[in-house]
Amino acid sequence: MAAVKQKLLLMGKSGAGKTSMRSIIFANYVPRETSRLGATIDVEHSNIRFLGSLTLSLWDCGGQDHFIDNFLEAEQENVFKDVAVLIYVFDAESMETKDTDYFRRVCDAIYTNSRGAKIFCLVHKMDLINENEREQFCKVREAQLKKIGERLDLTCFWTSIWDETLYKAWSEIVRCLISNLDTLKAKLRALCEVCEADEVVIFERATFLVIAHAVIEPHDDIHRFEKISNIIKQFKLSCNKKRAGLESLQVQNANSTVLILDFTVCTSIMLVCSDTRIRPAAVLHNIQLANEGFK
Ligand code: GTP
């Protein structure tokens, strides 16, 4: 498959939490370590190999006013051309008119330079918003942001580094860049059926973001997979600290068997079987046979 490089802009005011989320998702920071991060100067570029032929070119743009003004004026073409995805981060606790004004100008710059880009607004630090007020808060903010970006393809997420919402948002962001996602989902469904599993999930191996899943037995919890991402990633990091790599994990109880293992070079797979008569060795064999088709 031909190599594809996709440009992602990460923008928003200083202190909104951009570098924190980038460090947690792509550089294995744990949330509490982000309090030590300094302000980003100008732009920090990183190229992240993601799923075989896909490379993410991530531009973490410093959020101090003079940097944003410079991006919107002197540097506009350089920053805003060829953008596949804009991730605009708002600090939920302190969203002011100035922030939405900047966002409006950024939307205009995207409209001028990269009209087809997808826009993800991450209203972040939701842990600081009173739980009773969240629903109303989200409704009002979503309407406001959608109005500003009405000419663009815009989606809102409500995130915090302290729970799985960050994984939910970033999984959705990277999924929109995967060209063969439907084929991947169809293959996963076939694997799920062959293994007689209840569900199968594929995660990107380094970040543990959810790439695709197939579910035969649905669950009520809509954040189920992102919670699993979060938990397994923390577990993997703890193993790494003890210099013990985690290649596979098998958990079995009276009701089900769960297998998590490295799958292709860039992915890990999780499989849940509630039929305990099915032998893990047989499931592993099927996974190994299927592996070639996912490369
Ligand atoms: P610039 O680099 O100046 O543009 O700022 P930034 O947007 O990159 O902010 P940064 O990631 O450096 O985060 C600023 C502070 O916010 C840090 O102390 C983080 O620990 C804190 N923070 C990040 N995310 C969250 C969150 O979800 N909740 C809370 N309560 N604090 C957060």
Image (cartoon, helix red, strand yellow):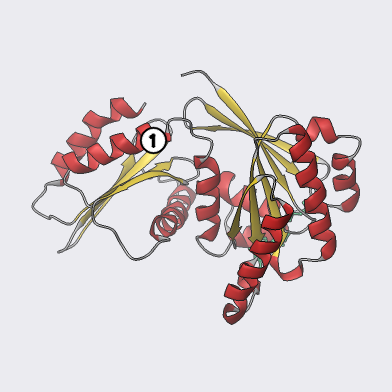
Instruction: Give the image location of residue 57, x and y in percent.
Output: 65, 33
Residue 64 vs 264, above or below: the answer is below
Picture coordinates of residue 131, whole percent (x, y) = 57, 78
Picture residue at 76% right of the left edge, 46% below the top: 107
Q: Residue at x 66, y 69 (%)?
A: 140
Residue at the image point whose x is 48% and y is 30% from the top? 179
Q: Is residue 250 left or right of residue 111?
A: left
- Tell me the element at label 1: helix
- Could you tell me which residue is drawn at 16 percent across and 63 percent down? 255
**Quadrant in which residue 4 is drawn:** top right
The image quadrant where one finds ligand 1 is bottom right
Counting from the top left corner in percent of width and height, residue 207 is at 50, 44
Q: Is mark 1 within 8 Å of ligand 1?
A: no
* Residue 283 sits above or below residue 6 on the image: below
Q: Is residue 267 left or right of residue 138?
A: left
Residue 7 position (above or below residue 104) = above
Q: Is residue 28 visible?
A: no
The residue type indicated by label 1 comes to Asp
Question: Left of 79 or right of it: where is 139?
Answer: left
Image coordinates for residue 113, horizontal then vertical, percent: 76, 33
> Could you tell me if residue 266 is visible in this image?
yes
What is the residue that sits farthest to the top in this orientation? 2
Q: Residue reaching furthest left?
A: 277
Q: How many marks?
A: 1
For the C terminus, the quadrant is top left
| Residue hosting label 1 | 182
Residue 195 horizontal side relative to residue 64, left or right? left
